[in-house]
Image: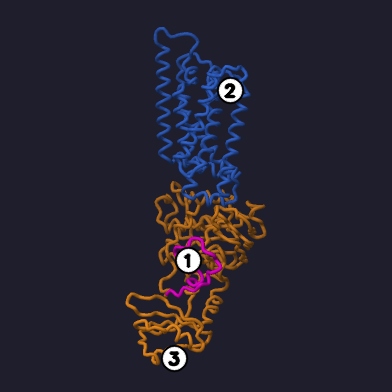
């Protein structure tokens, strides 16, 4: 059980996280989504006690992180975003070291080590020097260190980064298994992972929670409005206005003015309305050449992009406007490399 | 306690696994060996005499020895915390149920043990002297006591320096700068004219202390001074480590 209340973190003038509150209960897997620099890692660091919040409170299984840091930390297993390990140690030495840091008894450690090594697929490299391991193996050593002491709360920051597809499946399986009786908080930017693993999703942007719910809820919420994307040849004048007059259409936006001079539009109608026919008739009536007419269903990716859409240059924008739609054709998965977040001051 | 021992054994292992430690070990052995041989050679030559014994001179080293020792301490300790800050291993470390004090103490004791290990080979000199001449054991014991006490202070300054920066080089420079304070004390002692000031400065003048230890003079006030100064720097280190989070 994790409970976070009003977490805020400022770095000097910059506010990385602004009043985030949420809770994760036992047996629940909560996914935290957000673009680079949204404040995911900062939030996670506050929950694991690495960074004290500027204001706000965290309790882990009822232990306040500030007042009982050791008790609270003992409850948590944590896989940091950048898995940092001691390069000169061997895998089994490092894990043995972690059992001692966690204050496990020798008997408990003897029992836990082989089990963890097996479940994290580390048998092959058990006696290798960590400095010689590939990224995927290091990631799994980090994960092994996080679950070694059998914590009831697990916080995993990008758990499957750097793994090959086969390993990803195995690790997801492990995470799902771990999530059955534990509290799990996962940060990720791999959307299929969220849909497969998480019971509930938080979308974070600019240090705030911009959406919350089950993946199904979020999708249902977005599927409410029906969206038609069209491309009109030659960008005829007055097209936007004419389409806007169609009954049921709520908004018409220009997606992008291509160099070829064609006009791409995104037409959003009230839930349940299908405006395709009306759009076609309007085109015929005005003599526009329709190059494309597609009905678009919003996926989790679209919701993500819409909620977190932002100007690349806007350093510190007001979060109130985060709803501003950005009708980017989101074919590309939101899984860019998120490596620089840990370099915040 | 378990966490302290875990940190201690990991740090000790890290020392003995790193090539740097063996380079330092070799250098200090070469230096000590050459110094000792030279002292023995001069004292066994014609015209030498008086009350001087090789070990007595050995334990009253000159400025260059201190300079060398400062460098050794700075290099030995620079890694301790700076490396964890740089590589990010500080994150899994400080999010496990350990306190700053346990981490600092574990690392400090490991560094101190390694420092003592550097001096262990000089026991050979004592054996040689014991084998071939009459040896007064008292001053030898007190000489080693001085090395242990001063080493404790220096290593504490070093770990504090290491906690101030992510960069090991910066940490080493800071440590070196702080240690040169002890040089300054020695110079101030020579220059001071006021008797009270001289007295006060003398309490901090490690070089004078070492001279006395070499003669067999053990002043408990000095031991108290070493222990309290070390404790103070370790406390500063814990604070510096805790403060890293708050920025």
Label 3 crowding class (10 Å Cα cut-off): few <14, some 14-19, many 20+? few
Q: Is residue B93 above or below residue A201?
A: above
Cα distance, mark 3 to mark 1? 37 Å
Residue A82 sits inside the magenta stretch: no
Mark 3 highlights which residue?
A277
Task: State the SS at label 2.
Answer: helix
Residue B101 or A336: which is nearer the viewer? A336
- Residue stretch in magenta: A304-328
Q: Earlier in the sequence, mark 3 or mark 1?
A: 1
Specify few, some or many for label 2: CA neighbours under 10 Å numbering under 14, 14-19, or 20 or more: some
Residue at horizontal 42%, vertical 17%? Answer: B39
Q: B163 or A241: which is nearer to us? A: A241
Q: Which chain: orange?
A: A
Image spot of residue B14 (x, y percent): 47, 42
Chain coloured blue in this rendering: B
Determine whether the residue tagged by mark 1 lies in a helix, strand or loop: loop
Residue at (66%, 57%) from the top-left corner? Answer: A63
Residue A202 locus on image (x, y percent): 56, 68
Residue A147 visible, this angle: no
- Verify CB contact (< 8 Å) between mark 2 and mark 3: no
Q: In the rendering, which numbered label is found on residue A271?
A: none
Could you say where residue A247 lies in the image, as x and y percent from the top left?
51, 89
């Amino acid at each position: 059980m994790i409970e976070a209340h009003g977490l805020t973190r400022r770095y000097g003038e910059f506010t990385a996280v602004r009043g985030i509150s949420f809770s994760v209960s036992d047996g629940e897997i909560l996914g935290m989504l957000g673009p680079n620099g949204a404040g995911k890692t900062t939030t996670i660091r506050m929950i694991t006690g690495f960074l004290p919040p500027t204001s706000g409170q965290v309790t882990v299984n009822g232990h306040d992180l500030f007042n009982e840091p050791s008790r609270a930390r003992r409850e948590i297993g944590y896989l940091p975003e950048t898995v940092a390990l001691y390069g000169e140690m061997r895998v089994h030495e490092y894990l043995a070291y972690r059992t001692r840091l966690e204050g496990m008894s020798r008997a408990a450690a003897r029992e836990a080590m082989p089990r963890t090594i097996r479940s994290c697929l580390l048998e092959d490299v058990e006696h290798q020097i960590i400095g010689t391991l590939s990224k995927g193996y290091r990631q799994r050593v980090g994960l092994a260190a996080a679950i070694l002491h059998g914590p009831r709360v697990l916080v995993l920051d990008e758990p499957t980064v750097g793994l090959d597809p086969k390993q990803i499946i195995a690790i997801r399986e492990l995470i799902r298994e771990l999530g059955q009786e534990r509290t799990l908080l996962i940060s990720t930017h791999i959307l299929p992972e969220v849909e497969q693993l998480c019971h509930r999703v938080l979308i974070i942007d600019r240090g705030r929670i911009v959406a919350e719910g089950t993946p199904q809820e979020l999708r249902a919420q977005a599927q409410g409005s029906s969206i038609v994307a069209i491309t009109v040849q030659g960008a005829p004048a007055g097209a936007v206005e004419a389409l806007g007059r169609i009954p049921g259409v709520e908004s018409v936006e220009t997606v992008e003015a291509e160099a070829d001079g064609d006009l791409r539009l995104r037409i959003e109608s009230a839930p349940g309305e299908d405006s395709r026919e009306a759009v076609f008739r309007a085109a015929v009536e005005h003599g526009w050449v329709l190059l494309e007419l597609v009905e678009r269903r919003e996926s989790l990716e679209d919701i993500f992009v819409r909620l977190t859409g932002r100007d690349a240059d806007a350093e510190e924008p007001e979060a109130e406007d985060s709803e501003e739609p950005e009708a980017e054709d989101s074919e590309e998965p939101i899984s860019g490399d998120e490596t620089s977040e840990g370099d915040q001051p | 306690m378990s966490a302290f021992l875990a940190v201690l054994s990991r740090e000790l292992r890290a020392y003995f696994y790193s090539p740097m430690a063996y380079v330092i070990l070799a250098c200090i052995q070469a230096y000590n060996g050459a110094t000792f041989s030279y002292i023995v050679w001069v004292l066994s030559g014609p015209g030498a005499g008086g009350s001087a014994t090789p070990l007595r001179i050995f334990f009253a080293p000159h400025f260059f020895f201190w300079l060398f020792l400062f460098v050794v301490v700075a290099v030995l300790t620079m890694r301790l915390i700076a490396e964890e800050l740089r590589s990010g291993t500080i994150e899994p470390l400080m999010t496990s149920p350990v306190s700053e004090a346990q981490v600092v103490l574990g690392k400090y004791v490991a560094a101190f043990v390694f420092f003592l290990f550097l001096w262990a080979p000089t026991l050979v000199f004592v054996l040689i002297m014991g084998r071939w001449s009459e040896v007064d054991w008292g001053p030898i014991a007190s000489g080693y006591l001085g090395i242990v006490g001063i080493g404790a202070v220096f290593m504490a300054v070093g770990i504090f320096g290491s906690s101030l920066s992510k960069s090991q080089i910066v940490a080493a420079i800071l440590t070196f700068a702080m240690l040169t304070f002890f040089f300054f004390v020695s110079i101030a002692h020579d220059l001071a004219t006021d008797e009270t000031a001289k007295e006060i400065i003398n309490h901090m003048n490690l070089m004078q202390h070492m001279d006395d230890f070499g003669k067999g003079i053990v002043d408990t006030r000095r031991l108290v001074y070493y222990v309290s100064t070390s404790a103070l720097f370790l406390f500063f280190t814990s604070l510096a480590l805790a403060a890293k989070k708050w920025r």
